[in-house]
Image: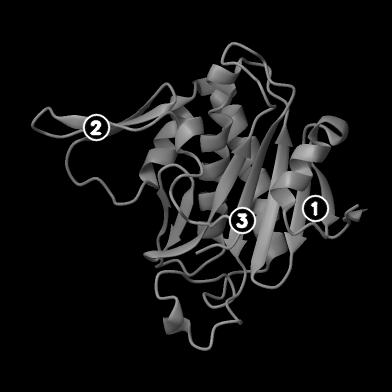
Amino acid sequence: MHAVTEAKKIHLPPPFTLKRSDARDLFSHAKARAAEDGAGTLYVFEGPRLFSFALVLEPEEPLVTSQNAFLLCMTSLADALAAHCAPERAVRINWPDEVIYDKARLGGARFAVPEGAQPEDVPDWLVFCAELIGDRDHLAAPGDAPNSTSLKEEEFDPSDDIVATFASYVMLYLDRWKHEGFDAVSNRFLMRIDPPLLRGVRRIEGDRLIEITPSGGGKRSAPLLEAAGKTGWRNADGIIL
């Protein structure tokens, strides 16, 4: 059994309950605990190479709609990282779940719904889990992995600050979704998509990313829940590549 302790250091908005965990596979831990611990539980793990945090959500809408909470959380993650790094560096998203910092992989996110949940079902819970490269101290030289970087190397602000800012953005975007519609969130998400779109149009249509070129052609992504986890930012052993 993995130890979980109540955290007192980080000040979060009232809906959140922070719990530090020694579970390196925080995603699995959060899924196992989601039903019991409930909405707003925010688990945090920090160890060699890896910094991760997982949030439990309890939606009020069917999965076909509530799955967009993943995009909301990805937007909150990217905005939180951007708030705690060098201002001239870009934080981007490789659709739908990979985090790119200054053209290098920083990590990504995973998403879980209850097993067997159907699009028309209102899920009992959803879990969003961010997994970021905390350090690359195991490398003999940074050039041994030229396509990635880490929070430590890039001198991000303390990880606790990132978590607190993430939680604040989640609350902000949930409020916008409620009062202005999901476009108020998805438009912010689209601004982060890598590479930037110089010509044409991008939009979220249902659970897909749509890109339309000036000539009228375009492409349509795989469904969100199918695409998540397929960008190749981590391997089967849970190592961020």
Q: Are marks 1 and 3 in contact (CB under 8 Å)?
A: no
Within 10 Å of the Cα at label 3, are there few (<14), some (14-19), or many (20+) other Cα atoms?
many
Q: Distance between the residues labelled 2 and 1?
A: 43 Å
Within 10 Å of the Cα at label 1, are there few (<14), some (14-19), or many (20+) other Cα atoms?
some
Residue at the left extreme of this rendering: 215
Within 10 Å of the Cα at label 2, are there few (<14), some (14-19), or many (20+) other Cα atoms?
few
Label 2 or label 3, whichever comes before in sequence order? 3
Q: Are marks 2 and 1 in contact (CB under 8 Å)?
A: no
Q: Mark 2 points at which residue?
A: 219
Query: Residue 193 appears at what percent x and percent y?
Result: 37, 46
Instruction: Determine the secondary structure under disc 1.
Output: loop
Q: Residue at x 44, y 76 (%)?
A: 145
- In the image, which disc is placed on residue 91? none
Query: Residue 113 appears at what percent x and percent y?
Result: 65, 29
Q: Which amino acid does label 2 sit on?
A: Lys
Q: Quadrant of residue 90?
A: bottom left
Of tags 1 and 3, the one toward the viewer is: 3
Q: Which residue is drawn at 71% across and 42% down?
A: 55
Label 1 or label 3, whichever comes before in sequence order? 1
- In the image, which disc is placed on residue 11? 1
Q: Mark 3 points at which residue?
A: 131
Query: Residue 98 appears at what percent x and percent y?
Result: 47, 51
Q: Which amino acid does label 3 sit on?
A: Glu
| 32 vs 213, nearest the viewer | 32
Q: Residue at x 65, y 20 (%)?
A: 117
Answer with left or right where residue 188 lies relative to residue 44.
Answer: left
The image's colour scheme reads one colour
Q: What residue type is labelled 1?
A: His
